[in-house]
Amino acid sequence: MEKKQRKKVKNPMSETESNDLDDISCLFFQKGIMGLFLLISIFSLLLRVAVSLHSYSGAGTPPKFGDFEAQRHWMEITTNLPIKDWYFNTTNNDLSYWGLDYPPLTAYQSYFHGLFLKHFDPNSVSLFTSRGYETHFGKLLMRWTVLSSDLLIFFPAVLYFVLVYYGGNRSGGNKSDVAWHIAVILINPCLILTDHGHFQYNCISLGLTLGAVAAVLSQKDLLACVLFCLSLNHKQVLSRLAPFERGIYEDYVANFWCCTSVLIKWKRLFTTNSLRFLSLVATILTFLPSMIQQIWSPSSKGFLYGLLNSSLAFYLFSFQVHEKSILLPLLPATLLAMELPGVLSMLLMHSALLSMFPLLCRDKMAVPYMALYMLSILLYLAPCGKQHIKRHLSRSMITFSIVISYLCSLVLHIIYLTIRPPEKYPFLFEAMIMNFCFSHFLAFTVYTNAKQWMLSRQSTSRDKEKKLN
């Protein structure tokens, strides 16, 4: 009896019995899941390559260009200067020109990628003379660094998560369900457009985070700690961790402070210190219910919901949020794709994409944006995704709301692309898009918090059944 109980606790994703990773791997090979994973991975990789053929942040826009130049410049700095000079202003390192302000793992990543560029195209990372370097070969090498990072870190992390998640849930999904879930995680249009279009390396930090999540679910605590610490040491900024000098928001982003600034002029009414305190309190109060639920009734599903709700809380209410920060809540949302109603998953992805639309338009990426936007809709309308949606479309009111939401989104896209805003309000359309998306994110946060608390009720009812038996 004790052995059985130990087995049940060992794999937190299982409600019946657990298996080690060797058994899970055998199960996957027998059912052909590994073959499906490889096929989906190849398709996902081709999508990334296709997006990387388009423009990027700051293309041909001196003097500072954009994120592409920032990443290239860090490779230039790390491969030409001693480690002690990487983070400090010197005659050879002007911090006012894309100074390296990310943690050490980003610096070492830049160093190794810089060695790769230096080997094949030394001019692309030569000190001072490589600023604004945009040759065709140089851009190919830069794109390859992101593709290889994605392939070596994010893709294996997805496989690890799926093996753990479905290995402990034998009855949790058939082959088509698993394949669809893999596709939802790998074909995340926001991540693809940000990393392989706009140009960043979120695939590294998110891949490490995903690996840590899978390790937690398989109760490999030491591995989870190592991977999560590596993730924090890759993407959490140093001097920009709390950029208070910029105010509570800088660009148009679909969070509370930016969207309500239409009515409440936060920057005029409150000091930076007051806004800092307000944002801290609002963020804590928003993720507190989720944290309390996990302490009260811990579970693996609750853990995933906790990740989703806490990341949404930070996106909606914390200080100085960037539009690309939506990638953080999107990761646990895709992991919970089989648990959340398909309708809500689709609406969240659609809102996240729309919130990034102005940024991607500035990068001249409207074409890949539209292509991936349509692909994401097709993914949810695929046989498995469609069944998942139909299960939650019984109420006509829900269907009506979804239709209205998509029509409004279509109108906003058309307005932004075809109509010039009034001179008095040059960012009017951005504000309209952000308020529209914020309303969706806020509703989604309320729903997922309620969903997490329902897990406690389910756990209590199961305990009662066990006592009766």
Image: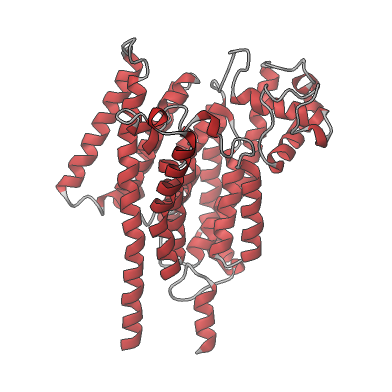
Say above or below: 452 vs 60.
below
Residue 73's quadrant in the figure?
A: top right
Looking at the rendered image, the quarter that the C terminus falls into is: bottom left
Question: Residue 137 location, x and y as percent?
Answer: 70, 20
In this rendering, does residue 375 appear at all? Answer: no
Say above or below: 378 vs 74.
below
| Residue at the far top in the pictured view | 423
Q: Nearer the viewer, residue 386 or 320?
A: 320
Q: Residue at x 82, y 36 (%)?
A: 84
Q: Residue at x 52, y 73 (%)?
A: 18
Q: Residue at x 35, y 84 (%)?
A: 466
Total numbered circles: 0
Say above or below: 234 vs 52.
below
| Residue at the far left in the pictured view | 396
In this rendering, does residue 265 appear at all? Answer: yes
Task: Please give left or right for residue 152 compared with residue 84 in the image.
Answer: left
Question: Residue 355 location, x and y as percent?
Answer: 39, 32
Question: Residue 46 location, x and y as percent?
Answer: 55, 34
Q: Residue at x 24, y 30 (%)?
A: 407
Q: How is the image coloured?
A: secondary structure
Say above or below: 111 vs 424.
below
Task: Please give left or right for residue 389 compared with residue 80 in the image.
Answer: left
Q: Nearer the viewer, residue 37 or 331?
A: 331
Q: Nearer the viewer, residue 35 or 172?
A: 172
Question: Residue 366 location, x and y as percent?
Answer: 43, 22
